[in-house]
Image: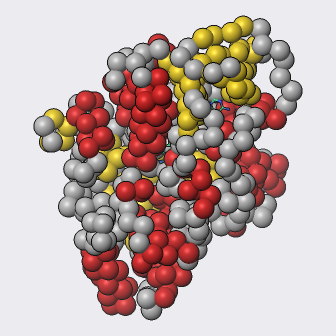
């Protein structure tokens, strides 16, 4: 990336001294130099059009099935229709490209993720997902493609001045930390094997395949932090580690995460498959595979604004920001693969309660560097995922990790920041006020911690803000009445819903299951 080196000015300095504790933790120096930075991905503002008046429709389009939203859920619906031989459908999104939170950026030979970036290996029982992975070439006859399994070294942690393989620095832990981490992992192991009277696993993916026994779902009534403290565990490292996991998977502090969700993170997968699947462009690769053969049916820059029941079908008005024109889409069936807070604004009555459905804001920074980071201190070298203990970030992923042999030297490092430490609404609003330089300074401070001096290798920083990045599995949501109602068939013939907020856990597997389920409903209806 080219561009002038910027100097910090007084305005930026003042802007950076707001009420955001972890942002203020950065060292600010007059005369400090920063690489060029910019905030990309402006579609969040497009959504505000939903609240304003709309011009009259100037054109109309017909399709039998209209899928609204091209994240992993919408793309999985398209894949399911296409796979069954049903091709009279269209897929639209307010964004220019499909992928939702799993989108990516960069040139074709140096992609990097903007959001979702990995998929754990699937359990054999998840047949639909396995079939898709086989179909996509991610596995063949049950064996994963080595190109997509994360190459060694997968993850490491920077703890007390040195790097350690994995996320638990066993050799450096104090005895109390070590024994409590061991006790926690033992608990997870015992839960993982549990099945209820109906032979259902205590925790499963998709989440709705999990046991509904009270013994398990009552865990949804308390926070993960309270559950852990209730076991008599107070180890600082265990607390940090479990909070890190909640922030990583749910964008949510463990003090706000349901204990059921916290345990699900560890116990829902069989645990014998350590490597994850990843690609330079992250999970955009998966969405692209879902979309193979359906690319021509995708229309970007189509903000859905108003949904009206029309005869036996539906009419959906969309707004194109490039032309300012409104299109009226007519369809026999509609799949709304958008977050529920969006679907609930389109004019149909859907189960939703703003106070109970909360979304985590995120900041993701792609840092373009001349070289790869090296270690100042002891420990294993660069991993795909590099995590600093005690930071407000989750660390960084090396976007070109799977292709480093081909591209030694230059790198794109994707730095992940779930914005926690306040209400999501407050954090979302505050995020919108920050200039790119403020975010850049924060990201550089994180690199200073892990790799002193490396900041001078960073040539540019691109920043993406996800206002409603992920549904937050707060206590009471996963097994409460609202989510149950959100998953019931709608009161409207021909209207289907699919989004990870209906699962309560925002992972590719859940999006996939939601999309497949909605498309199967459509296929049953239309024959
Ligand atoms: C920073 C980050 C990192 C993540 N990392 C991972 C990971 O590593 N692995 C993983 O499995 N999951 C990860 N996730 C979770 C990821 O969100 C889910 O896995 C999944 O991609 C969500 O898909 P979805 O279709 O349910 O929702 P979304 O991706 O939210 O898709 C909804 C779509 O609806 C569109 N839309 C919204 N409103 C309108 C409208 N009015 N009109 C038209 N279109 C509209 C949006 O533009 C979007 O494309 C991450 C999420 C974030 C934010």
Q: Quadrant of the C terminus?
A: top left
Residue found at the far right of this picture:
53
Q: Position of residue 438 (x, y in %)?
A: 69, 50
Residue at 53% from the left image edge and 21% from the top image edge: 65
**Vertical comparison of 121 with 422: above or below:** above
Residue under the image location 50 percent in, 32 percent down: 74
Q: Residue at x 38, y 62 (%)?
A: 210
The x and y percentages for residue 335 are 55, 31
**Image location (x, y in percent) of residue 81:** 40, 25
**Residue found at x 56% / y 25%:** 333
Is 481 situated left or right of 316 in this image?
A: left
Q: Name the image quarter holding residue 322.
A: top right
Quarter holding residue 517: top left
Relative to residue 153, is residue 414 depicted above or below?
A: above
Measured as percent of width and height from the top left, residue 151 is found at 24, 46
Of 73 and 373, which appears nearest the observer?
Answer: 73
């Amino acid at each position: 990336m080219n561009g002038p080196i910027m100097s910090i000015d007084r305005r930026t300095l003042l802007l950076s001294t707001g009420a955001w504790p972890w942002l203020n933790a950065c060292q600010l120096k007059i005369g400090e130099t920063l690489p060029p930075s910019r905030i990309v991905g402006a579609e969040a503002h497009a959504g505000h059009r939903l609240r304003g008046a709309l011009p009259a429709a100037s054109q109309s389009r017909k399709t039998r099935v209209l899928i609204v939203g091209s994240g992993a859920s919408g793309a999985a619906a398209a894949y399911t229709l296409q796979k069954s031989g049903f091709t009279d459908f269209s897929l639209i999104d307010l964004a220019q490209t499909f992928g939702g939170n799993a989108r990516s950026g960069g040139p074709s030979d140096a992609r990097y993720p903007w959001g979702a970036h990995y998929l754990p290996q699937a359990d054999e029982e998840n047949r639909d997902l396995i079939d898709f992975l086989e179909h996509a070439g991610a596995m063949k006859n049950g064996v994963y493609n080595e190109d997509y399994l994360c190459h060694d070294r997968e993850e490491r942690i920077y703890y007390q001045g040195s790097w350690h393989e994995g996320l638990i620095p066993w050799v450096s832990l104090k005895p109390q930390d070590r024994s409590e981490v061991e006790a926690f992992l033992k608990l997870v192991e015992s839960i993982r094997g549990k099945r209820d009277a109906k032979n259902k696993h205590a925790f499963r993916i998709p989440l709705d395949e999990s046991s509904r026994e009270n013994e398990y779902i009552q865990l949804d009534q308390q926070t993960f932090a309270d559950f852990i403290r209730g076991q008599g565990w107070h180890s600082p490292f265990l607390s940090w580690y479990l909070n890190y996991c909640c922030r990583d998977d749910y964008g949510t502090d463990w003090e706000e995460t349901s204990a059921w969700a916290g345990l699900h993170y560890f116990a829902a997968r069989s645990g014998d498959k350590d490597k994850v699947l990843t690609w330079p462009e992250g999970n955009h690769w998966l969405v692209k595979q879902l979309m193979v053969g359906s690319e021509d049916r995708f229309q970007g820059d189509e903000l859905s604004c108003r949904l009206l029941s029309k005869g036996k079908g539906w009419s959906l008005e969309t707004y194109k920001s490039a032309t300012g024109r409104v299109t009226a889409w007519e369809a026999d069936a509609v799949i709304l693969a958008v977050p529920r807070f969006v679907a609930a604004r389109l004019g149909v009555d859907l189960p939703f309660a703003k106070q109970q459905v909360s979304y985590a804001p995120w900041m993701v920074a792609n840092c373009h560097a001349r070289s790869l980071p090296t270690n100042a201190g002891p420990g294993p070298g660069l991993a795909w995922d590099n995590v600093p203990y005690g930071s407000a970030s989750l660390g960084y992923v090396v976007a070109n990790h799977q292709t480093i042999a081909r591209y030694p030297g230059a790198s794109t490092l994707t730095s992940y920041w779930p914005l926690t430490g306040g209400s999501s609404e407050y954090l979302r609003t505050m995020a919108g006020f920050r200039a790119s330089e403020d975010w850049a300074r924060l990201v550089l401070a994180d690199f200073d911690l892990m790799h002193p001096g490396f900041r001078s290798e960073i040539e540019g920083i691109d920043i993406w803000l996800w206002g409603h990045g992920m549904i937050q599995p707060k206590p009471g949501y996963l097994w409460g009445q609202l989510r149950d109602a959100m998953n019931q068939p709608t009161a409207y013939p021909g209207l289907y819903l699919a989004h990870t907020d209906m699962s309560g856990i925002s992972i590719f597997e859940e999006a996939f299951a939601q999309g497949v389920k909605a498309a199967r409903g459509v296929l049953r209806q239309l024959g």
